Image (cartoon, rainbow, N blue to C red):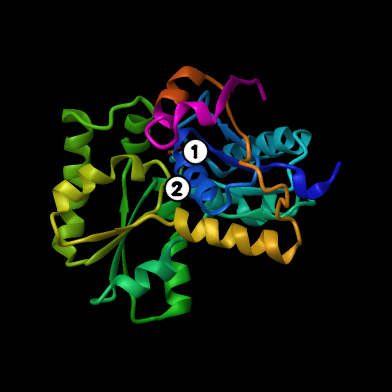
Amino acid sequence: MDRNRQPIGVFDSGVGGLTVVNKLRKLLPYENIIFLGDSKRNPYGSRSKEELLQFSREILQFLTEQHVKLVAIGCNTVTASVYDIIRKDVDFPLIGMSRGIRTAQEISVKKKIAVFATEVTIANHAHRRMAEQMDPEIEIIEQACPGIADCVEQGKLTGPEITALLKKYTAPVLASGADTAIFGCTHFPFVQPLFEKLCGDKIVFVDPAHEMSLQTLDVLKKDSLLNPHGMPGYLRLCFTAKAERGAKLAEHLIPANEFTVEEIAL
Ligand code: DGL
């Protein structure tokens, strides 16, 4: 099979990775994309390294069987915890979720950048370590947000439960004086309006999915893997459970007639 025409794989614990798919499709409209959301086993945000390794390997096996030419990991938790291990397992380019530090650095006047992420991502200090390398003067304020990805997954994008959680997590960040915040979990852009409502004009939010799509474009170009077809690419959304619910949430980002949905077993 002509390698350039093979699909790009994207995966996450659930619908969060769709925020990455959405940006990828805008920048790379001719690429075919297969997305895998592991909705049967999410959330991933407080899972052990062993579990994340096993789940990621099963997903990569599935995507390999679909003949992907590249995989973009639409999950910060997997990237922070096991990327260095799983990248050696595959013989196609594997791109870890971007941290968004570059964009945040350009925006932040005070060099005080907050990161909202899962417990695993925060425990790995993934963003702090990268920021230190780029500019030691940047202060990273880390905020773990258990429960948010789960609410998003259940379609609770507004209402008392998600509002109470976000109030709890934004309060210390507002008190820290940060002027910029990174969504360090791909589920969080689904509730960006609520984050913005609670933070007023004090904080600018950065969605690293944009950096991620630019990075993917770079790799495709460098490896001469861009699809030359010139026709809109297909989008296959695969979920390990609750595919209908996944499709409903996908429709918040992507028109329903632009994707197909299936439930698969890993
Ligand atoms: N969306 C994922 C991330 O970026 C995982 C969220 C979860 O399943 O807890 O970290």
Q: Quadrant of residue 224?
A: bottom right
Is residue 17 or residue 49 the one in the foreground?
17
> Is the CB atom of the residue marked by disc 1 within 8 angstroms of ligand 1's nearest atom?
yes
Identify the residue at image location x=50%, y=26%. Answer: 257
User: Cβ of disc 2 within 8 Å of ligand 1?
Assistant: yes
Residue 63 visible from this viewpoint: yes
Q: Secondary structure at mark 2?
A: helix
Look at the image and give the residue range highlighted in magenta.
249-266
Query: Which of the two residues, 82 or 36, is positioned nearer the viewer here?
Result: 36
Q: Residue at x 28, y 76 (%)?
A: 111
Q: Is residue 51 above or below residue 93?
A: above
Task: Point out residue 81 in the picture as x, y percentages from the top left corner.
Answer: 55, 51
Q: Residue at x 65, y 20 (%)?
A: 265
Of the four image quadrants, the one with ligand 1 is: top left
Who is closer to the viewer here, 181 or 235? Answer: 235
Mark 1 crowd level (few <14, some 14–19, many ≥20, 10 Å Cα): some
At which x and y percent is residue 144? 33, 49
Q: Which residue is mark 1?
A: 47
Q: Residue furthest front?
A: 230
Q: Earlier in the sequence, mark 2 or mark 1?
A: 1
Q: Quadrant of the C terminus?
A: top right
- Does the magenta portion include 63? no
Can you see residue 242? no
Q: CA distance from mark 2 to mark 1?
A: 7 Å
Which disc number belongs to residue 38? none
Q: Quadrant of the N terminus?
A: top right
